[in-house]
Amino acid sequence: MPYVNVRLLKGRSKQQKAQLAQVITQALADICNAPAAGTHVVIDEVDRENWAVAGELVADRDS
């Protein structure tokens, strides 16, 4: 029973997240022979003000 946790910046559509979950599930089935019915994908969305790259908040980089 694979469990995959994906963290992304907020802003993806419901359709994009659904497609991502489907692709991850299919990849695990194809590569690891993991049954799709037992594959869990959790998508955590993070606010831009709570994510930093190279010590700088992403929200500040956008300005």
Image (cartoon, rainbow, N blue to C red):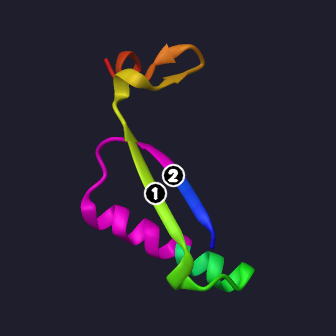
Q: Position of residue 57 (x, y in %)?
A: 44, 18
Q: Nearer the viewer, mark 1 or mark 2?
A: 1
Q: Quadrant of the C terminus?
A: top left
* Magenta residues (range): 6-24
Query: Residue 6 — which label?
Result: 2
| Labels 1 and 2 touching (C-beta < 8 A) | yes
Rendered position, 47 above or below 39: above
Left of 30 or right of it: where is 51?
left
**Which residue is located at x 35 percent, y 21 percent?**
49
Q: How many marks?
A: 2
Q: Is residue 19 magenta?
A: yes
**Which residue is located at x 39 percent, y 71 percent?**
19
Give the crowd class for mark 2: few <14, some 14-19, many >=20 residues within 10 Å: few
Q: Position of residue 58 (x, y in %)?
A: 42, 24
**Which residue is located at x 36 percent, y 62 percent?**
17
Give the crowd class for mark 1: few <14, some 14-19, many >=20 residues within 10 Å: few
State the residue position of label 1.
42
Query: Which kind of residue does numbered mark 2 sit on?
Result: Val
Left of 29 or right of it: where is 60?
left
Q: Nearer the viewer, residue 62 or 43?
A: 43
